[in-house]
Image (cartoon, rainbow, N blue to C red):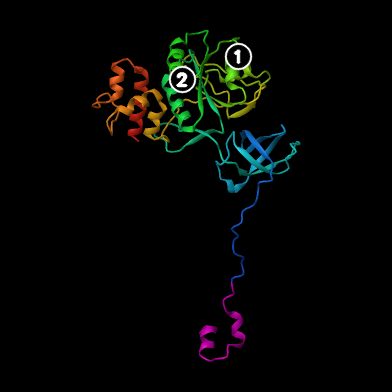
Amino acid sequence: MSPRRLASSGIDTGEWSSYDRPRRRTKPRTKQRPDHSSLPIGTVITIDRGRYRCRLDNGVEVIAAKARQLGRKAVIVGDKVRLDGDVSGSEGTLARIVYTEPRVTVLRRTADDTDPYERPIVANADQVVIVTALADPPPRPGMIDRILVAAHVAGVCPILCLTKADLASGDDFVKLYSTLGVPVVTSRPGSDLRDLHELLNSKVSVLVGHSGVGKSTLINALIPGAHRATGHVNDVTGRGRHTSTSAQAIPLPQGGWIIDTPGVRSFGLSHVDPEDILAGFEELDKVALDCPRGCRHADDSPQCAINDALMAGMVQQSRVDSLRRLLNAAASR
C-alpha cells in the first residue's frame, strides 16, 4: 500500500513518507525571447560549407556560423542577419548568426515542374538580370519566360542581357522583349557596358542563366579585379561548365551589388500557381481579362480572348506557346 493510502487509512506513515513521488522542481519555460535588436547587421555575401561570409555596413567582412535554432536553410545569400560574438573580422575569429531580418524579396525556383521543393536563389534582390547567350550555347526563349514569371512572383524587376552578340544577331529578342517593357542590353567582347552599368547603379541585382552564357565574363568586365573564373561550352553537348559553384554577392564600384549564381540547366516553376503564371505574361494577362470564366487558355478553348488576339496579330505566337506549355505543366502536377 502506498504511503498516501496508508495515511488516508489512519496508519502512521512515519519513515515511509520519504518514498513518496518527488515534486516537480524544473522551472517552467519562459516565453521571453532574446533581444537581438542591438546586434550589428551584416549582409550574407557567400556561403561555403556551413560558413557564412557577411559584410557589415562599415565594410568589414566577418565569417560566421549559424545558430542551430534558425534551421537548416534559414539563411541564403542576400539575407540581412544579426551577428553575435566576435565581429572584428580578424583572422581566425568566428561570429554567430542569431537572427534573420524579414526579407523584402526572395527569388525561387524548383529543379523541374514536378519538384515540390522550393530552392531559394537569393534574398532581397531588386532586380534579376537574365543572361542569355545569342550563340554557343543557343538561346532558349522558354527559359527566359520562366525566369520572367519567377521574377514577377518574387516582386523583382527583370532585365534581359544578351551576350556573345559577335556570334549572332539579337534583333528579334530586342524587338520582342522591349515591346513587353523589359529592358534589353546586348554585349560582346570589349563592348561598352555603359547601359548595363546605369541599370545596375545602386541596385541589388542577381544574374541568372545557363552555364556557359558568360555571367562570370560579364562580371569581370563590369567589376575590374573581380577575377571570376570563366569556362567554355562543350562542342558536343552544347552545354557550359559550372564555373560558379555557389552564389556570391560582389559590391559594384558605383554602388549597389551584383550577385553571381551557378548556371542552371532548368528552371522549374512548381511553386507558382497557374494564376501567377498567367500574370507573369503581362501582355497576355491583360488580354485574358476578356476570356470567359474558367477558360483554360488552350488553343481549343471556346471564346478564348488570347486566341482572338493571336489571330488578329496583337500578341506573339512564341509567347502564347510558352504560356501554354507552362499552364499544361502546372495542370499535370
Question: Residue 81: image x %, image y %?
Answer: 63, 40
Q: What residue span does the magenta drawing correspond to?
A: 1-23
Question: Residue 72: image x %, image y %?
Answer: 55, 43
Question: Residue 105: image x %, image y %?
Answer: 53, 34
Q: In this view, does 280 lie above or below 175?
A: below
Query: Which residue is identified by label 1?
Result: 194
Q: What residue is drawn where x is 69% and y is 46%?
A: 38
Q: Quadrant of the C terminus?
A: top left
Q: Residues within 10 Å of mark 2 (few under 14, many from 20)?
A: few
* Badge 1 element: helix
Is 236 part of what is drawn in magenta? no
**Which amino acid is tagged 1?**
Arg
Q: Is residue 23 above or below residue 234?
A: below
Checking the image for residue 102, the label placed there is none
In this picture, residue 90 sits left or right of residue 188: right
The quarter of the picture where residue 317 lies is top left
* Spatial CA span between label 2 and label 1: 20 Å
Checking the image for residue 181, the label placed there is 2
* Badge 2 element: loop
Q: Nearer the viewer, residue 34 or 117?
A: 34
The quarter of the picture where residue 276 lies is top left
- Name the mark nearer the viewer: 2 or 1: 2
Q: Residues within 10 Å of mark 1 (few under 14, many from 20)?
A: few
Mark 2 and mark 1 lie on one chain; the one further toward the N terminus is: 2
The quarter of the picture where residue 251 lies is top right
Question: Residue 15: image x %, image y %?
Answer: 62, 86
Is 3 part of what is drawn in magenta? yes
Count of number-bearing discs:
2
Q: In this view, does 267 lie above or below 82?
A: above
**Which amino acid is tagged 2?**
Gly
In this picture, residue 114 sits left or right of residue 254: left
